[in-house]
Image: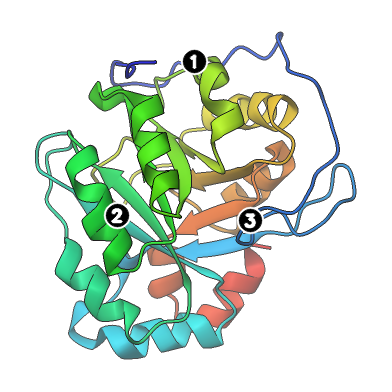
Amino acid sequence: MTGLRSRPGCEGSRTEHFGRPGEAIPGKAGGLLTGRKGFFMTTISPSLLAADFSRLDRELQRITDGGAEWLHLDVMDGVFVPNISFGIPVVKSIRKCSPLHFDLHLMIQDPMPYLKPFADAGADTISFHPECGCDAEAVIDAIHALGKRAGVAICPSTPAESLQPLLHKLELVMAMSVEPGFGGQKFMDCCLPKLRWLREAAPSLDLSVDGGINAETGRLCREAGANVLVAGSYVFGAEDAAAAIRSLR
């Protein structure tokens, strides 16, 4: 299956067609922590981009002590998205001082050449955008060959149903609730029907949401089926990170 391309904007997903419902089972590395149908414990993945980079070791300790399980790492190339963030040296450096599950989000035009370097640097889950035009199945297979969990992230305008042929190969799907590449955007609720469809189609999949997450939007996403919440400034910008994390569960 080759990559998908989408237009900017929020088209949402159709909800009238569902896959087979089933029992939730534990994921390979956190996320789905229960076998009870319809109940999922929430994993919090604070986004490193919102941290104070002048004191990353203390910032990472603060969210770890506050109860976060994952760390979300947004990698931007200036091509697939207009901005540039950080790369392999930063991931490798913070791996030395953080026990968190590294949730890598590749917002880049050509993910394949960078999979092994980021895996070697310490990524645990590697997600990419099929909208970049890559061979999505080949990228997923390459991630698995490196012993890592494979994820796909989709932009607001990409229908969830377009992922149907890939779901059986994935450990995670991330529904973007903002346009990728910029922080501080308003939450787009078109991700909610996508989450509902995905939870029905793939009951044991980790479902993540990235963009504009706070206590209220986090609740909406959990109710729609998300079990991984990516939050940037809401956690790192909080005076009490532990309280912010608790409010997301």
Q: Callout 1 environment at 10 Å: few (<14), some (14 to 19), or many (20+)?
A: few
- Is 78 located above or below residue 68 in the figure? above
Q: Quadrant of the C terminus?
A: bottom right
Q: Quick one: SS at disc 3?
A: loop
Place of residue 57 in the rendered image (x, y in percent of width and height, measured from the top left)? 31, 88
Residue at the front extreme, as displayed: 145
List the residue tagged with mark 3.
28
Amino acid carrying mark 3 in the image: Lys
| Residue 158 in the image, given as x and y percentages of width and height | 42, 20
Q: Is residue 222 above or below residue 248?
A: above
User: Residue at the location (58% across, 48% down)?
Assistant: 217
Q: Is residue 21 left or right of residue 177?
A: right
Q: Residue at x 9, y 42 (%)?
A: 78
Amino acid bearing label 1: Ser
The residue indicated by pointer 2 is 74
The tag on residue 162 is 1
Q: Is residue 168 left or right of residue 136?
A: right
Question: Residues under labels 3 and 2: Cα distance?
Answer: 22 Å
* Quadrant including the N terminus: top left
Position in image of residue 71 (x %, y %): 43, 67
Residue, x 60% and y 42% (percent of image)? 207
Q: How many marks?
A: 3
What kind of residue is marked 2?
A: Asp
Query: How far across and how far down the image is residue 49, in percent?
Result: 28, 63
Cα separation, mark 1 vs mark 3, equals: 24 Å
Q: Nearer the viewer, residue 53 or 165?
A: 165
How crowded is the residue under tag 2: few (<14 C-alpha within 10 Å), some, or many (20+)?
Answer: many
